[in-house]
Amino acid sequence: MNINNLRASHIEEIPIPVPPLPVQRRIVAEIEKQFTRLEAGVGALKRVQANFKRYRASVLKAACEGRLVPTEAELARKQGRPSETGAQLLARILTERRRKWLALRSPGEGGQGRGKYKEPAPPDTAGLPPLPEGWTWATVEQVGVVTLGRQRSPEHHAGKFMRPYLRVANVFEDRLDLSDVTEMNFTPREFEVFRLEPNDILLNEGQSLELIGRPALYRGENPGVCFQNTLIRFRPGDAAIAKYALSVFRAFMHDGRFQRIAKWTTNIAHLGASRFAGLAFPLPPLDEQARIVAEVERRLSVVEELEALVSANLRRASRLRQSILQRAFAGQLTPRDDTQ
């Protein structure tokens, strides 16, 4: 095994410049002065970063409480036109979902004729805050399909149908990291179940408590990719725009809603597909969802640009700290005094 190590003899051999004591004192004083200024700047930048985080959470909270854009009910009233409410939208979509399921199951239409349609459970609205005019409470499973990923076990490590799959390490808030994607065997039938499609949302099923439910939108970046059971997939139906659902789930992560329903096992929090599916979901009309998405993206794109600038300045501060020390040991930090 090759392990780098630093021995005392190595340290003893390092040449160290030793200026006169008065010069050393001036150098130390100048280092402390410049480091104090630098730390003050770094502290200010980190406070700005924390403010960005709070602002992002407030934008997402406002988005799913109907406080970010005018409601569809307001606009329709001003424009003297009819509009579909969230409750009407939900009822229409659930009716259509039931009709399609029954058509597929009907023996007379080539269906399988098995089983019984299971209506998604409505939310328990007791204790829920009031929603804006035209909105309604649904459950996550009423507005989409919730699926837990496939278990990673030894028998799937090799096979005829090796395919890439995503896991917790690939899913960050509103971002997928595909730099390290591994493979396991998915039969053609399993592939149909666990294959990702554009606009699927992946959420961390098992994570540390503060990151449980961390969601990201799959945009088709890696075609043919599947997902592991450390992730939950939400596939939006016709009642919810994918990016609106993503904003809701991000808000849930930031306000602690996912943490409150999580269960602990072996120091890891688990969201649970059934618990997630039963969460109350604030549902506005579709046109309003689209306006909310556009406003969220507008506001958060500004934050992202500013965050990139702050991060660049923090990296610059780190390099500046090294530069101060290099100049100090090269005798370039304080004016030279030939009398010393």
Image (cartoon, rainbow, N blue to C red):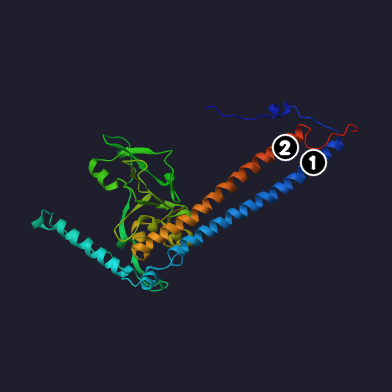
What x and y, as percent, mark residue 133?
A: 38, 73
Q: Considering the image in quadrants, where does the C terminus appear?
A: top right
Q: In this view, does 277 lie to the left or right of 20?
A: left
Q: Name the residue under label 1.
A: 28
Residue at label 2? 325
Vertical position of residue 72 compared to residue 297: above or below: below
Mark 1 residue type: Val
Residue at x 38% of width, y 58% of height: 245
Labels 1 and 2: the sequence-earlier one: 1
Extreme right residue here?
339
Relative to 229, residue 122 above or below: below
Label 2 SS: helix
- Graded by Cα atoms within 10 Å as few (under 14), some (14 to 19) or many (20 or more), the crowding at tag 1 reads some
Residue drawn at point x = 70 percent, y = 37 percent: 323
The residue at the point 32 percent across, 69 percent down is 85
Residue 248 vs residue 142: left or right? right
Whole-percent x and y of residue 26? Answer: 83, 40
Q: Residue furthest toward the front?
A: 79
Q: Which residue is at the front of the view, 208 or 267?
A: 208
In this orientation, which residue lies closer to the viewer: 322 or 84? 84
Above or below, 30 against 130 in this view is above
